[in-house]
Amino acid sequence: MNYLPTIKQGITDNNLPNEVGQLLSAFNNFDLKEHIKKTGIKKSAALISKAARIGEKIDLQEIEKETLQTVQKIQPNIKIKKFPFYFIYAGSGTDAKSFGGTAVVINLGYYAAQLKGAIKTNNKVPKTVRDQILAASIHEGVHVFLNQLGLSWKHSNQDEIWNIIWEDGLATYMEPTHFGPSTDYYSENNFWLVIISKWLDAKEDSKRKKVIYEALKSKVMKKIGQRQIQAAISSLKRGVKPEDIFTDLLFVSNGPAYHIGRFLWERELAKGKSLHELVEEGSSKVTGWIKHIPST
Ligand SMILES: [Zn+2]
């Protein structure tokens, strides 16, 4: 469902239909009226028009179709149940979500913000934008299918870091193309495997804090994750629970866990088991995957 025309109209009306307002609020607490107040009517109208243009220029039904075909591969023996796709505008901060594994929600505002200039009627949307939207859609689609299969770890109180690495690693592995500076973490996979293994062994808070300080030495994070480093240091000072700090460090802003997780899936698949066999095994073996650190 493409909500961009409705949201664009909402700017003119300075009002949104209730269900759309609730959808945006559920996505990232987005409030259109607030957004207009903060960003100004002209700029918000331009951004929403650009996002709407992306929605017109890209065949969104094709995106849905390709997503379902790709996601089905993680378990070809069980047919994926239909679920909704929502294309929305919700500012520029968050790209996509799966609403706890129930829907694929893509924020075209995120992609509009990255493009310079307006998209004129006869301009094409760059292929890289379509590729990014497809990758995000497949990523969230994997969360939805895992949820249908009863294998999703998101929003469970048994969540532990390795379960999320298993799930988000698979979702990232299934993306046909990988983007952004955060993919640099992929090149640092040995460093992160050591860090996460140490974390799994460290049970007391004092030891866990030491692992966090060690993680902050990541060369890639120093380069592209200064905000995450500052957030972790401030949380350590405030006495936030180490597991919360470590989870944020690994996952916030396309952090290292996605890319290390992808690396782990690639390495396990190279050993010969099929994708759906590994998926069926669930996340229980992933600590073993993490603890296998190649010597260099
Ligand atoms: Zn994810």
Image (cartoon, helix red, strand yellow):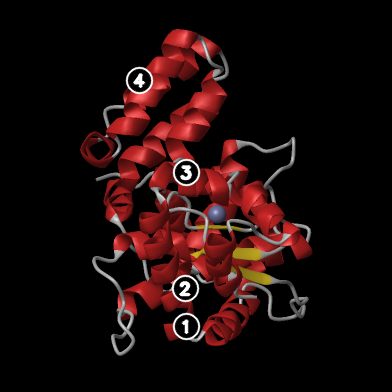
Choose mark 3 or mark 4, whichever is in front.
3
Q: Is residue 39 visible?
A: yes
* N-terminal label among 3 and 2: 3
* Residue shown at the point (42%, 70%) measured from the top left: 49
Name which residue type carries label 1.
Glu
Q: CA distance from mark 4 to mark 1?
A: 47 Å
Q: CA distance from mark 3 to mark 1?
A: 27 Å
Mark linked to residue 52:
2
Above-or-below relation of 233 to 90? above
The residue pinned by badge 1 equals 56
Q: Specify whether 216 is left or right of 44.
A: left
Dot 4 or dot 2, earlier in sequence: 2
Quadrant in the picture for residue 43: bottom left
In percent of width and height, residue 161 lies at: 57, 38
Q: Which residue is mark 4?
A: 213
Q: Amino acid at mark 4?
A: Tyr
Question: Going by the image, does 40 lie left or right of 155?
Answer: left
